[in-house]
Amino acid sequence: MWNSIDEGDVVEQTHISGGQTPKFRPPFKTGETLEFNRTTSTATEVEQVEGNRLLSGKFWSEGSMWFQGRWFDPFDEKIQQI
């Protein structure tokens, strides 16, 4: 699991592996709908797909890696000292 912070937006993601990996391959088209794990996402830009949860992929000539996660508001998070 890893967290990514981009211009104040925070996402927590986990790697999708094995037979669960989405079979989608770029190029993606604006307006294209992607269905994965009972979640529908719609491409709003070539680099970005909107949905309730984040589905992101990294692609290269020999393969791909997929990640899924959720967006959250960092101001709603509480830090606990153990």
Image: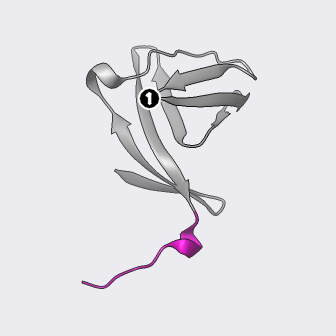
The relative height of residue 24 versus residue 14 in the rendered view (above or below) is above
Residue 52: image quadrant is top right
What kind of colouring is applied to the model shown?
one colour
Magenta residues?
73-82
Q: Is 1 inside the magenta-drawn segment?
A: no
Residue placed at 37% from the left, 44% from the top?
14
Q: Residue furthest bottom?
A: 81
Depth check, front residue: 11 or 39:
39
Image quarter (top left, top right, bottom left or bottom right) of the C terminus: bottom left
Tell whether 12 sits left or right of 5: left
Majority secondary structure in the magenta region: loop
Per the image, label 1 sits on a secondary structure element best described as loop
Q: Where is residue 16 in the image (x, y as percent from the top left)?
A: 35, 33
Q: Where is residue 19 in the image (x, y as percent from the top left)?
A: 29, 19
Residue placed at 58% from the left, 22% from the top?
34
Residue placed at 48% from the left, 25% from the top?
36
Q: Where is residue 23 in the image (x, y as percent from the top left)?
A: 45, 15
Tell whether 69 sits left or right of 47: left
Q: How crowded is mark 1: few (under 14 residues within 10 Å), some or many (20 or more)?
A: few
Tell whether 82 sits left or right of 21: left
Residue indicated by mark 1: 37
Q: Is 78 inside the magenta-drawn segment?
A: yes
Residue type, label 1:
Asn
The relative height of residue 71 versus residue 30 in the rendered view (above or below) is below
Residue 28: image quadrant is top right
Residue placed at 34% from the left, 82% from the top?
80
Q: Where is residue 3 in the image (x, y as percent from the top left)?
A: 44, 56
